[in-house]
Amino acid sequence: MVPATPPREHVTWTEGNARSIARQRLAEAIRVLRACGASVDGEVGDASPVVAAADALRRAPAYDEVIASTFPPGMSRWLKMDLPSRLARLSRLPVCHVIAAPHPAPASGGSDPLP
């Protein structure tokens, strides 16, 4: 699940822009995780990573684990909100926290990546 977080670097944006950026991130995350041998799927969700994860868990409660991908401490808004711990409490599943290496991308949106 990738939240449709509004892009911070754009002066104006639409929900469609945010969802398009999230779809691109989702496709890349699935590609990378599958290349590592993981069996993963995903969807685009609410702009809030906690709400988006809760929605996904309600719709398909048979997950084995939650993978939370964030930028490194200091760069990550999601770590400041203690996202990995919040996801563990919410899901009651193991949470694997992956720290992504930031890289410039035209569709980055300024949010943490979350496969």
Image: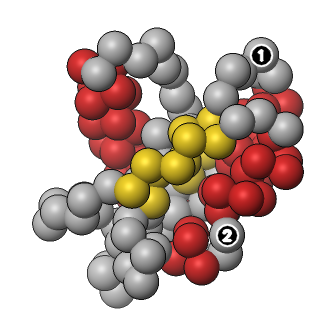
Query: Which residue type carries mark 2?
Result: Asp
Q: Is residue 21 left or right of residue 102?
A: right
| Residue drawn at point x = 44 percent, y = 76 percent | 73
Structural crowding at the residue carrying mark 2, measured as other residues with C-alpha within 10 Å and reported as few (<14), some (14–19) or many (≥20):
few
Tell me, yes or no, if residue 56 can be seen here: yes
Residue 50 or residue 22, whichever sits in front: 50
Q: Residues within 10 Å of mark 1 (few under 14, many from 20)?
A: few
Say above or below: 115 vs 9.
Answer: above
Residue 44 in view: no
Q: Which residue is mark 2?
A: 82
What's the residue at 63%, 36% (across, down)? 66
At 48% from the left and 19% from the top, the residue drawn is: 40
Mark 1: which amino acid?
Ala
Write down the residue under mark 1. 62
In the rendered image, residue 44, in percent from the top left (x then y), is placed at 54, 40
Which secondary structure, mark 2? loop
Point out residue 1 in the picture as x, y percentages from the top left corner.
Answer: 56, 39
